[in-house]
């Protein structure tokens, strides 16, 4: 199975830019999807295929990847962006088995 | 717009079977090109993929849970279900069902994602 590294917590000042990263060997082969989860709510897809936004995701969210690391960047963070963010990708085995990172708690100051 | 809703007992005794159902509305679980999955989240912790069932009935499980898990479709009721045998306290979690299209198309290609989720059902394993 895949080992995943995500910073447990990140903070950003209102209106500033923040990058949330996810590192795993599988990301050399497979793209990351990103889910936003607010307290007491189900996760919501905010980025997929590395850099594609689903309809409804504000364009201040962008995605990128390089080597074994995927990133979700929020340019001009808003108070409503405060949430947990999880990366997810297909397991390195290639089977239909999905791995989630441990999540990054984003605080908007 | 697809809607998913989990239901089942909120309390399960240790060693018994945890069973949940996900009712789908706004679309058919028999539609080609979709997986239907289960993901869980222990209190205060992260997400864990449990497994998926393809519209054809093929199943795919997390290797760490494979010996205890069964996921199946009930096309007549447009729902799918999860059974987890020999439950322990470590299985206490919020259980989510989710739709996973075989390909949500983005900038350069199509990708498998969990695009619609249920609201989640808390299941506690305790005597």
Image (tube, rainbow, N blue to C red):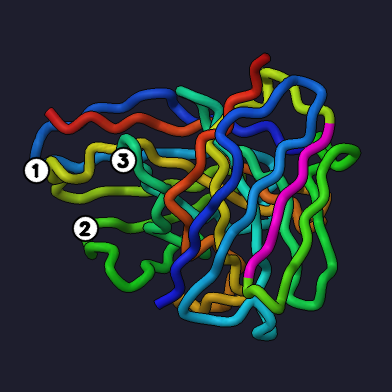
Q: Which part of the image, by quadrant, shows the C terminus of chain A?
A: top left
Left or right of B85 in this view: B20: left
Residue on which the image places disc 2: A60
Residue at 85%, 38% (x, y): give it. Answer: B68
Instruction: Decide which of tag 2 and tag 3 comes sooner along the chain.
Output: 3
Q: Residue B90 occupies which quadrant of the picture?
A: top right
Please report the residue visible at 22 percent of the width from the left and 63 percent of the height from the top: A58
Crowd class of label 2 (few under 14; some 14 to 19; many from 20; radius 10 Å): few
The answer to if B81 sits in the magenta stretch is yes
Residue, disc 3: A38
Queried whether the magenta region covers residue B20, the answer comes back as no
Please, what is the dominant secondary structure of the magenta stretch?
strand
For residue A101, say whether it is visible. no
Regarding residue A51, the answer to whether it shows in the image is yes
**Do marks 1 and 3 share a subunit?**
yes
Which residues, given as a range, are shown in magenta? B79-85
SS of the residue under disc 3: loop
Residue pictured at 67% horizontal, 28% vertical: B12
A50 up-or-down from B104: above or below: above
Q: Which subunit holds the residue at mark 1?
A: A
Q: Which mark is residue A15?
A: 1
Q: Is residue B80 above or below residue B14?
A: below
* Disc 1: CA contacts within 10 A as few (<14), some (14-19) or many (>=20): some
């Amino acid at each position: 199975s895949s080992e995943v590294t995500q910073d447990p917590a990140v903070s950003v000042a209102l209106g500033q830019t923040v990058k949330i990263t996810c590192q795993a060997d599988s990301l050399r082969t497979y793209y990351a999807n990103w889910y936003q989860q607010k307290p007491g709510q189900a996760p919501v897809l905010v980025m997929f295929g590395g850099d594609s936004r689903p309809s409804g995701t504000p364009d201040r969210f962008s995605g990128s990847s390089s080597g074994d690391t995927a990133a979700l960047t929020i340019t001009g963070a808003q108070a409503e962006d405060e949430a947990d963010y999880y990366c997810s990708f297909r397991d390195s085995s290639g089977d239909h088995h999905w791995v989630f990172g441990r999540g990054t708690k984003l605080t908007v100051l | 717009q697809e809607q998913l809703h989990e239901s089942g007992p909120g309390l399960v005794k240790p060693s018994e079977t945890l069973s949940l159902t996900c009712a789908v509305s706004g679309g058919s679980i028999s539609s080609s090109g979709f997986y239907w999955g289960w993901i869980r989240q222990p209190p205060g912790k992260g997400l864990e993929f449990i497994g998926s069932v393809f519209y054809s009935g093929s199943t795919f499980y997390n290797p760490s849970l494979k010996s205890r898990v069964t996921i199946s479709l009930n096309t007549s009721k447009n729902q799918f279900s999860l059974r987890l045998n020999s439950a322990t306290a470590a299985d206490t979690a919020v259980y989510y069902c989710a739709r996973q299209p075989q390909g949500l198309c983005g900038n350069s290609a199509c990708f498998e994602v969990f695009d619609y989720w249920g609201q989640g059902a808390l299941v506690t394993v305790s005597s």
